[in-house]
Image (spheres, rainbow, N blue to C red):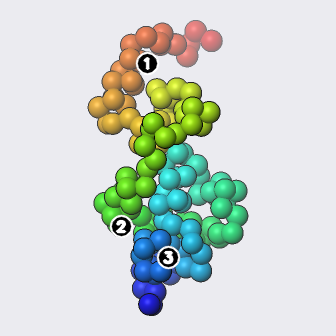
Amino acid sequence: MFAETSSRYVTRNPEILSGEPIITGTRTSIRAIVGLWRLGIMPEEILNHLPHLTLAQVFDALSFYLDHQAEINDYIERNQIPNELVHPAVKPIREDHPLAKFAGILSDAEAAELKHSITAECRQVDANEW
């Protein structure tokens, strides 16, 4: 079997993760990097979670994702752990947290409703009051 190069740092190898896009020379999937990024983790901070990668590899993975969103989102969806199998200790404490939208927990409509509820219930502060 041979590897197919998709970009400078992204490749596919049928023998690794069934051909899912990965960082060349690793088994790190693009979906793993995108998952961290969608949680609001900055590319520079992703290196703390995946220290074997370079910043160039992370940015290339994100660029690849932006060009292939439907495909990578499909890999993310297919690899999600069913909620009933997730141990309570690792479940989010609050699914209404603003970062939940980035994690894919809330739909766009739910995020808009949450934003409206927060805005409606929070007192607006006049900067001149300070």
Inter-mark Cα distance, 2 to 1: 34 Å
Q: Assess disc 3: are there few (<14), some (14-19) or many (≥20) residues with their C-alpha within 10 Å of its C-alpha.
A: some
Give the side of residue 46 with respect to residue 112, left or right.
right
* Residue 7 appears anywhere in the view: no
Question: Judging from the image, what secondary structure is the residue with disc 1 in?
Answer: helix
Of residues 4 and 57, the one drawn nearer to the viewer in this rendering = 4
Residue for point 57% across, 32% down: 88
Q: Position of residue 2 (x, y in %)?
A: 45, 90
Q: List the residue tagged with mark 3.
A: 16
List the residue tagged with mark 1: 118
Which of the marked residues, 3 or 2, is nearer the chain's N terminus? 3
Q: Nearer the viewer, mark 1 or mark 3?
A: 3
Which of the pair 22/111 is nearer the observer?
A: 22
Mark 3 or 2, closer to the camera: 3
The residue that appears at 33% across and 29% down in the rendered structure is: 110
The residue type indicated by label 3 comes to: Ile
Real-space Cα separation, disc 1 to disc 3, in angstroms: 45 Å
Q: Quadrant of residue 44?
A: bottom right
What label sits on residue 67 in the rendered view? 2
Q: Residue furthest front?
A: 85
- Quadrant placement of the C terminus: top right
Q: Is 41 situated left or right of 6 in this image? A: right
